Amino acid sequence: MSEWRPQVLVFLCQWALKSDSEWAHRTELPPGARIIEVPCSGRLNPFLLLSALQQGADGLLVVGCEPGRCHYKEGNYLARRKFATLQSFLAHLGVEQDRVQVVWLSETESGKFPGVVANLINTVRQLGPLEALAKRATISGSKGTGAPCTIEA
Amino acid sequence: MQELVQAIREEARRLLETGQVELVIGFAEGTLPMHSAPVFVRQVADTNRLTWNSFAENNLARYLRGVRNKKVAIVAKGCDVRAIVALINEHQLERDNVYIIGVPCRGMMDRRVVTRRVPGEVAAVREEGDELVVDVRTETGTAPQVVRLPRSELLHRSCATCIQPNPVIYDVLAAEPVEVWAVDPYAYVREMERRSPAERAAYFAAEAARCIRCYACRQACPMCYCEECFVDHTAPRWIESGATASGLQGWQIGRAYHLTGRCVDCGACERACPTEIDLVYLNGKLRKDVWDLYGFEPGMGLGQLPPLAVFLPDEGPEFRP
């Protein structure tokens, strides 16, 4: 298991941490973290989080704007209820609560972003690979060429 | 019980005769003992088919959306009415189109439990006070043996922990309200919460593995009314469509989470499940969280706002880095 490296996915609100210097922090991210930009944390479909966990992510981070600073006025308030219940539900199913984190970061707090990601990776490293949920099969093959695809469970 | 059935039939007859409603949805005797079946009564002559007993377990609110532009009467117990209220609050039904014949409910009995408790085939059942009297046939050609079982041991799990056996709204009540039994509705969920994450993961995996993806839980649920279910989406395909471990778990998670703040705890999903998956522990967790976090219980009154569609600016959790 020495080769295992935590894979974490960051769903980042496009309005949080929004300036050139702040985006530079992306380059400081530890390996294993990937960023997916979303229009608003309130627009994030919980099924995307579920899909990520079922497709190999060991940890998830949702970054939204802090309360009162949502570009769309109330997206993060709605996200708060959505993710509070989702986090708790996943924990009930055996997904350790710390694997799925939600953080509010306003524009002025972007310096904290790499630290938050590193913290998640460290937490996930200690917890080990996600084993509470079964993984989705991966489909490999040559798309669009008519060659047969193989599905590995 | 007989007076209750009489009251339901008379009310149905009056409503159809006066033309107040086009259709009465209720229960009729099924073809087998302990199987009461939903019935759609359109003619006065058929109102005699209506009945009521402790096996009227389906949630009839399920059918209302299909006839929502008609004037319809429904024979509804506590949980059915909660589902109707929740559907009205979600703008799926018009209050004026539904005539509710409310039935205070003492809890429905689980025929699976009855079948397991008796030594042979159930030939007939009747209710006497707090007991279910079962005629059991052990061998063909022999006279049935009589077994008496206490009602309290036969209740469905969601019925045993029911918090609202009396209809919250109604147009007419077919019997006197029953006393609400004081129980902790979340005792079972609390018990599950005390287990370790690894134990819970193993339990969930074992439960989900029994799923055969028949979607009976979805079809029985009064609140599952999406025109296209997430599980039928192909672009994107949210979860695996096959009966794989990941697909089965994805279905169970998605179905339950989609009912956050919407599940009225009627237990229809669990009763419909052919493999008896523990769905109460999934739905119950979400109901408990919504209650603990937002003090919300679905279907308890008209005008309630869905908890995931509203918010308070200064509520928790903090989500501070």
Image (cartoon, coloured by chain):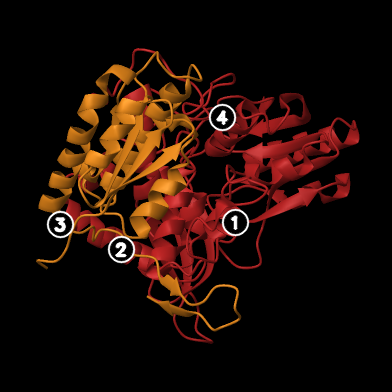
Chain colours: A orange, B red
Residue B270 percent location from the top left of the image: 46, 55
Q: In the visual, does A58 lie left or right of B4? A: left
Q: Secondary structure at mark 3?
A: loop
Which of pointers 4 and 2 lies earlier in the amino acid sequence?
4
User: Residue A80, percent across and down?
Assistant: 37, 27
Chain letter of disc 1 in the image:
B
Vertical position of residue B205 compared to residue B20: above or below: below
Q: Earlier in the sequence, mark 1 or mark 2?
A: 2
Chain assignment, label 3: A
For disc 3, the marked residue is A128
Say which residue appears at 74% left-offset and 31% top-offset: B98
SS class of the residue under badge 1?
loop
Residue under circle 4?
Answer: B167
In front of the other: label 1 or label 4?
A: 1
Can you tell which mark lies on residue B205? 2
Asked whether the residues under marks 1 and 2 belong to the same chain, the reply is yes
Out of B109 and A125, give the one closest to the viewer.
Answer: A125
User: Could you tell whether B72 is left or right of B45 in the image?
Assistant: left
Q: Amino acid at mark 2?
A: Ala
- Can residue B276 be seen here? The reply is no
**Could you say which disc has been placed on residue B207 in the image?**
none
Earlier sequence position, callout 1 versus callout 4: 4
Q: Nearer the viewer, mark 4 or mark 3?
A: 3
Label 3–label 1 contact, CB within 8 A:
no
Cα gap from disc 1 to disc 2, whole angstroms: 26 Å
